[in-house]
Amino acid sequence: MERRPQKSSSFSTSSSTTREEKSREYDRHLSLGSISIRITGADDDPLSPTATAVDNRKPPFTTGDQTTPGSDPSAADNESPSQSDLPSLSENIDQFINILRQSPEIAPDLPDVAIERLISLIEKDIAKYYDSSPDDQHLISFLESVSLASNLSAALIPFSSLSSDYLRSLNQTGASVHNAMSFLEFHFHSLLLSTSSPQLPSLLRSIAASMISAGYEIECSQVFLVTRYNAMEADLADQSFEKLSIDEVQRMAWESLETEIVSWTKAFRHAVAVSFPIERELCGEVFGEHRDIAGGIFRRLTRGILIQLLNFAEAVAMTKRSAEKLFKVLHMYEALRDMVPKLDDLFPPVETSGDVAAEYSGDDLKSFKNMDSHEELKAEMAAVQARLGEAAVAMFCDLESSIKSDTGKTPVPGGAVHPLTRYVVNYLSYACEFKNTLEQVFRDYQKLDRSGDDEGGSGGGAGYSGRREGSGGERGSGGGRNSNPFARQMVEAMDLLYSNVEEKAKLYKDLALRNIFMMNNGRYIVQKIKGSTEISQLLGDTWCRKKSSDLRQYHKNYQRETWSKVLGCFKDEGLQVKGSVLKPVLKERFKSFNAMLEEIHKTQSAWIVSDEQLQSELRVSISAVIVPAYRSFFARFSQYLDPGRQTEKYVKFGPEDLETYIDDLFDGNPMFIIRRK
């Protein structure tokens, strides 16, 4: 089999090039232009890089002025042919072609006049149509005349070495066909940019059939590919996707990159779900009779666009790892994962027979098949998806580093919920919206080493380290959690948060405030867990019950630290001797109670309990203990104080006043003056 002439085409690419190099190669090759091939003598070495081989698709021709020896060049002009002459010309030339096919050993006389008039008709139409595009009917007639010339050229080839007249006619006809193909390239491109004609698919199909029949399938495919590729790039731009290099992505600030990722996700889903099916349908309409060509063009077209999109995704996966990037990376991961089935539906099995595949042989054919392989494209997508999955695991695990590194020595005023607690719990709550995806990426990628000096992960977070000894991941009724690496990592993060909060509680010198701080943070965590089915399932019932139990213990500790001394003022011990009340001791008891209550009111009214239910529970529990005890003490002993000034001096609060003052606690508004009774 003779080697076909090689043309500059986006169909050729080195299998060893990287994805980004392939992207640049697409950009280099995707440019319009007429491609000329000159067929030389049969003695040329078909494998020589400087020689061109005989191409049975295209007749040999030369460009320039060509006239028939002995003929009057003005004759054709005086009898300018028109499309109405085409039926008679077609009849004459078809008869001549049939004679040539029936008598391959004999060269009959050439129908010079018919050939010259056909060439003149084609050239005249070309000149006219460059100035003013043909209407649909004229285009069909023009294609018929070109098809006739192409068939004539093919029939003349075997006789061109037997007769100089045949060689001359072959050159003239071949040049005319080539000129027609150049025009059809131009017009094909123009029609591809148009959306006005309802007959557009039919016209495109007719032009494609004519060019392919004449042996110009590469040029036709190239024009289609370039035009539609540019249209798809414009479509990506409409989705706000900007083509960026890996270096540009690496240098981009996260705030800007976030916006680009949102655009990428939208553009990727739109390309696969909307644009690619449209392009596949258009390829089928235009090249319906040549399924291998249609499939090859569609694969190259989609591959070029996907390379751009995959480059960006891979660049994002290579950026410095941090917990804040997790959710955008998961959006990208899900887009790739979700679109793979749609791509499978779009790509039929690769066919390597036919016009385009016949252009290649040996190693070139192997390269052609590899380049078109949908499995190769899926492998590239899977590789990028894996990079994103690995990055997601590392970014989630980086949350541990964020918790460990928060070692601030300034306590939160009023014992309020610490910002770290809010950040971590809200982060994990949002992460659970991606529960299924995170479980998938942890199953698939958590075993991979994510050391700090990993490529693209410099400065990244700690890798997955498994369960801590005695952590919540080994407890609970959810037995399946032990086989769920994401659940284990969730427990690990929550345990680290609790440890960090316990350390921060030690910054408070007041033990009561320390317990208020632990209550605030514990309550915030427990309420968030109760409000999320996903987190509850991941952490397990036992873990949640343990934290609720801890919360009750903090409450008891607060009561003991704050109010046990107050209750001590109401004890009978030491107040009576032989049945008589010791007034000095009683006065001291009332004075101590007044001072304690004033100090508690002044201090703890500045403390903060933002959870209304917890705030109410605390106030009710305090009132339930203090008010009855004081009422009983007041009722039994206030009578022993002399009425008037002495009573006013030592009894500052009535039992009814206590609830009012208790209701001032934990509002975050310090009160320094308490109204006297």
Image (tube, helix red, strand yellow):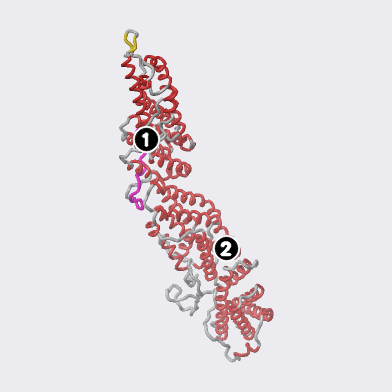
Farthest-out residue, front: 644
- Name the residue at 55% across, 77% down: 178
Task: Kindly identify the amino acid type of the residue bearing the numbered disc 1.
Answer: Gly
Q: Which residues are magenta?
A: 454-469
For disc 1, the neighbor class at 10 Å (few under 14, some 14 to 19, many from 20) is many
Q: Secondary structure at mark 2?
A: helix
Kindly report the secondary structure that dominates the magenta region of the rendered protein. loop
N-terminal-most mark, 1 or 2: 2
Residue matched to label 2: 283
For disc 2, the neighbor class at 10 Å (few under 14, some 14 to 19, many from 20) is many
Instruction: Provide residue 307's location: percent of width, then percent of height.
Output: 46, 59
Q: Decide whether residue 458 is among the magenta residues.
A: yes
Looking at the picture, does residue 286 appear above or below residue 316? below
Question: What is the number of the mark on residue 448?
Answer: none
Q: Quadrant of residue 205?
A: bottom right
Seen from the viewer's position, the closer of residues 89 and 237 is 237
Looking at the picture, does residue 676 appear above or below residue 485? above
Residue matched to label 1: 415
Q: How many numbered marks, from 0 up? A: 2
Task: Kindly identify the amino acid type of the residue bearing the numbered disc 2.
Answer: Cys
Q: Decide whether residue 170 is among the magenta residues.
A: no
